[in-house]
Amino acid sequence: MFLQGYRKEIFRPECNPQFQSLHCIAHLDDDVAEVLPYLNAVLGGHQYLKDPPALTLKVHGKLITLHPREIAINALKDEGEADKILEWLKQEINETWQKRDTIEPSFETPAQPRIFDILKLLPKTSCGECGQPTCMVFASLLAQGVKGADDCPQLDDQNRAEIAHYLKQFVFEL
């Protein structure tokens, strides 16, 4: 087993203590720097940095950043969600390391959804029915994985399907 365990720290962001979401820092028992390019290849990271090594993932609107000795997760509902994500990552780290001989490591940042490509498919009425002030804001939330095409009540079925198809290439599930 590559990663044995971690010590978890849950807190509210200091910049705004009234935020409802929580953040988590997991202090890792082992240095995972060597597995990061393999994880980038397997999970399709949002951003990969070589020096210092770091891999950022976007999962369901959350940013998860893996550093050699810690994992940072933002926008958590509760501690249980942090536990679920950390256990998933621990399993992914260990399985990826075990299979590294069959994986081509990636030191590149993969392609990301483009807001303007999404915006072209939206009605561009800025009606606010989705809960956002403009279609541009809604498009950025779609690109981040926070919202889905079904969250736009004015979107026709053809464009809804095109958006879902476009975004599918950038998303992976826990």
Image (cartoon, rainbow, N blue to C red):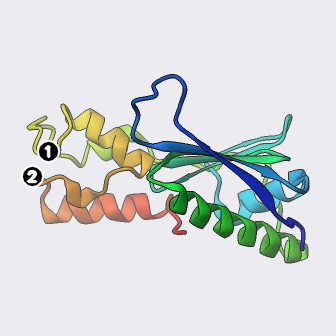
- Check disc 1: other Cα within 10 Å, few if <14, some if 14-19, many if 20+: some
**Quadrant assignment for the C terminus:** bottom right
Residue annotated with mark 2: 154
Q: Is residue 89 visible?
A: yes
Q: Amino acid at mark 2?
A: Gln
Instruction: Return the x and y of residue 80 as percentages of the image width and height.
Output: 53, 63
Instruction: Return the x and y of residue 141 as percentages of the image width and height.
Output: 35, 43
Q: Residue at x 14, y 55 (%)?
A: 155
**Quadrant assignment for the N terminus:** bottom right
Say which mark, if any, is on residue 135: none
Q: Is residue 38 above or below residue 137?
A: below
Q: Is residue 103 left or right of residue 63?
A: right
SS type, badge 2: loop
Q: Residue at x 12, y 38 (%)?
A: 128
Q: Are the residues tagged 2 and 1 within 8 Å (C-beta)?
A: yes
Say which mark, if any, is on residue 123: 1
- Check disc 2: other Cα within 10 Å, few if <14, some if 14-19, many if 20+: some
